[in-house]
Image: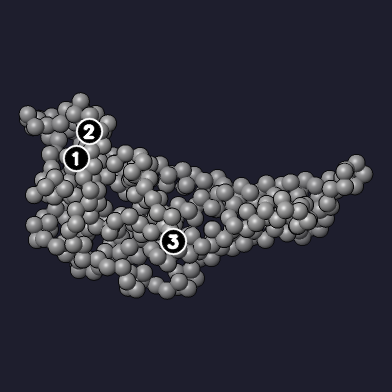
Amino acid sequence: MSDDGLHQRKPETSGERGDNALSSEEIEKIYSEYEVVEAPDWESGIERGKDDFGKTMSRRLLHWGPIIAMAITLSIGISATYLHLQWWPLNSVGSFLHLSLFLLFNYLVFSNLAQSAFIGPGYVPLAWSPPSVEFTSHLQYCAVCEGYKVPRSHHCSTCGRCVMKMDHHCPWINNCVGHRNHAYFIRFLAAAVAGCIHGAMIISLALYRGLFRAWYIQYGSGEPEVILTVYTFIMSVFAFGLALGVIVAVGFLLIVQLKGVWKNRTGIEDYIVDKANSYERSSEFLYPYDLGWKRNVREVLGTWNGLPVGNGVWWPIRRPTSQFSLSVSAPL
């Protein structure tokens, strides 16, 4: 079988090291060369269909997580738009383009939230078996799904299914983040952060002009007036606080996600690699899916339409690892 099959060279423990063990120099050379073996054309036995999604769009979105996410977006969007029309009325091309950009961020938040929730991560079919019986000894069996787990998949107790390339279960999209919706999820986070930065800027500038309205009337240069009532002031301050909260919290999550994309690792795989490296070894554990940062980014964000690369079962890897190097049942 080829190098993308079952056989791999495993680092041995310090007490077992032989002539074939990977030295630190060999590991360093491997990491610097990034010799990639493309995904094999083995059958996956998984086809994308209606049952893969599990729930309709309405059932995915009518949940406390997506509802709160959409409510926060609407609160910031409505407040910022209302203030924008006073602070910079639509009487110029610049004003129109500025407000259009902000509304575009809002659209991207809603559309990518919906795509992340509905498309889902991709579920391993119940009672799934690999195309070759030889593979079963290298895969973990899921007693709940009554089938084998594909490489990089993990069982989600919330979804009740094994998820392809599972990163985490996100309550804000009422679904897992995984192979098929990872790009949409990152776009959702990026649009939320960018939109909230833009919205916070609009709200703060409009509030400043509204609070110092008397000064602008007396000493200004004819700037549009921003009239604040008690209600609009409270609403605007509340929306500004929400925007700052999203910038900090979602911004942190976005950084974590981008670091994972850079390394082509999910959060679960980070834990597995750390656990593997904690064992007594003669050399560092070689992570099979780190293909170099450019290829890593393309694996997740490489398509304009957000659709995933590959079938979510068999993956491009780096030599001298195999398709099963990270399987839980295979020796680390």
Residue 87 position, x and y percent, is 77, 52
The x, y position of residue 330, in whole percent, is 15, 49
Left or right: residue 57 compared with residue 138 = right
Mark 2 is on which residue type? Ile
Q: Residue at the spot x=36%, y=47% of the render? A: 298
- Look at discs 3 and 1 and give the one toward the viewer: 1
Marks 2, 3: nearer the viewer: 2
Which residue in the protein does label 2 denote? 30
Q: Could you give the CA–CA distance between mark 2 and mark 3, rounded to whole angstroms?
A: 35 Å
Residue receiving disc 1: 319
> Are the residues flagged by discs 2 and 1 in contact, CB closer than 8 Å?
yes
The part of the image, by quadrant, that contains residue 10 is top left
Tell me which amino acid carries mark 1. Arg
Residue drawn at 90 percent across, 47 percent down: 217
Q: Disc 3 designates what residue?
A: 116
Q: Crowding at label 3, few (<14), some or many (≥20) Cα neighbours within 10 Å?
A: many
